[in-house]
Amino acid sequence: MVWECVDIEAVKPIPKPVTLATIKDTESLAEMALVKLSRLSVSPVTPKEWRIICKMGGL
């Protein structure tokens, strides 16, 4: 397995925070690693999942 690490920085505040509970209650994110696995600190996010979360947050 190859691990990658990226540095990220917020460019603007998210208008509406997206909670873990909201993510878990969202059917389109049911297969997300964050939902299915117990390690919250390290989990991949697909481009599609990222778009859904950004939309949920008002971006």
Image (spheres, grey):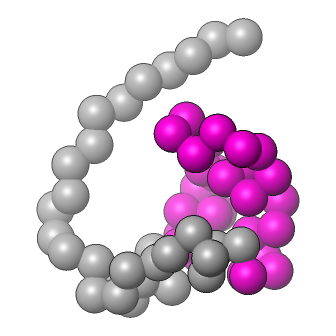
Residue 21 among magenta residues: no
Instruction: State which quadrant residue 24 falls in.
Output: bottom right
Side (left or right) of 25 relative to 53: right
Side (left or right) of 6 relative to 44: left
Side (left or right) of 28 relative to 57: right
Compared to residue 49, the image places residue 4 above or below, namely above
Is residue 32 visible in the rendered image? The answer is no
Q: In the image, residue 56 lies at what x, y percent?
A: 51, 85
Q: In the image, residue 37 lies at what x, y percent?
A: 76, 45
Q: Quadrant of the N terminus?
A: top right
Residue found 36% across the figure and 30% down from its top: 6
Compared to residue 23, the image places residue 31 above or below, namely above
Residue found 81% across the figure and 80% down from its top: 27
Residue farthest to the top, as pictured = 1
Q: In the image, residue 43 lies at what x, y percent?
A: 61, 40
Residue 35 among magenta residues: yes
Residue found 58% across the figure and 45% down from its top: 40
Is residue 39 visible in the rendered image? The answer is yes
Q: Quadrant of the C terminus?
A: bottom left
Instruction: State which quadrant residue 39 falls in.
Output: top right
Side (left or right) of 2 relative to 7: right
Count of picture labels: 0
Q: Which residues are magenta?
A: 25-53
Which of the pair 18/10 is nearer the observer? 18
